[in-house]
Image (cartoon, grey):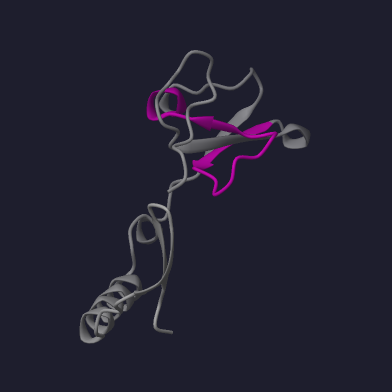
Amino acid sequence: MSPVRRCSRTACRRPAVATLTYVYGDQTAVLGPLATYAEPHAYDLCDEHSERLSAPRGWEVLRLAPDPDSLGPSSDDLLALADAVREAARQEPVQPRETGRRGHLRVLRGTE
């Protein structure tokens, strides 16, 4: 599991929920869903700081709403997970066999 990304605001320890980027040529601040990866010229913001965001005078703030369909697992993801669980339940458990000993440690090999 990857670590939780935190808000970029100084002294804020809340988890990030949105990413802020700037388009300097258009004088636009773009606030959108949390980016997949942390980018060096983007700022991750928590819920509170993303709601209170303001831009310099003359700038426009463009708020992009997240796609509700992409927030949770899709029905395809759930079906694939259910199929994987069923398949794992059908297989017999593999019993490792001991092939050697070194002091208190044992070397185990699978039956592959």
**Closer to us: 90 or 111:** 111
State whether residue 5 is above or below residue 93. above
Span highlighted in magenta in the image: 28-50
Please tell me which residue is depicted at 47% across the width and 29% down the height of the picture: 6
Residue 17 placement, left or right of 94: right
**Closer to us: 64 or 89:** 89
Q: Position of residue 56 (x, y in %)?
A: 63, 18
Q: Position of residue 75 (x, y in %)?
A: 30, 73
State whether residue 62 is above or below residue 53. below
State whether residue 74 is above or below residue 103. below
**Closer to us: 26 or 86:** 86
Which of the 4 image quadrants contains residue 40? top right
Q: Position of residue 96 (x, y in %)?
A: 34, 74
Residue 63 placement, left or right of 55: left
Please tell me which residue is depicted at 42% across the width and 21% down the height of the picture: 13
Quadrant that contains the C terminus: bottom left
Q: Position of residue 90 (x, y in %)?
A: 22, 86
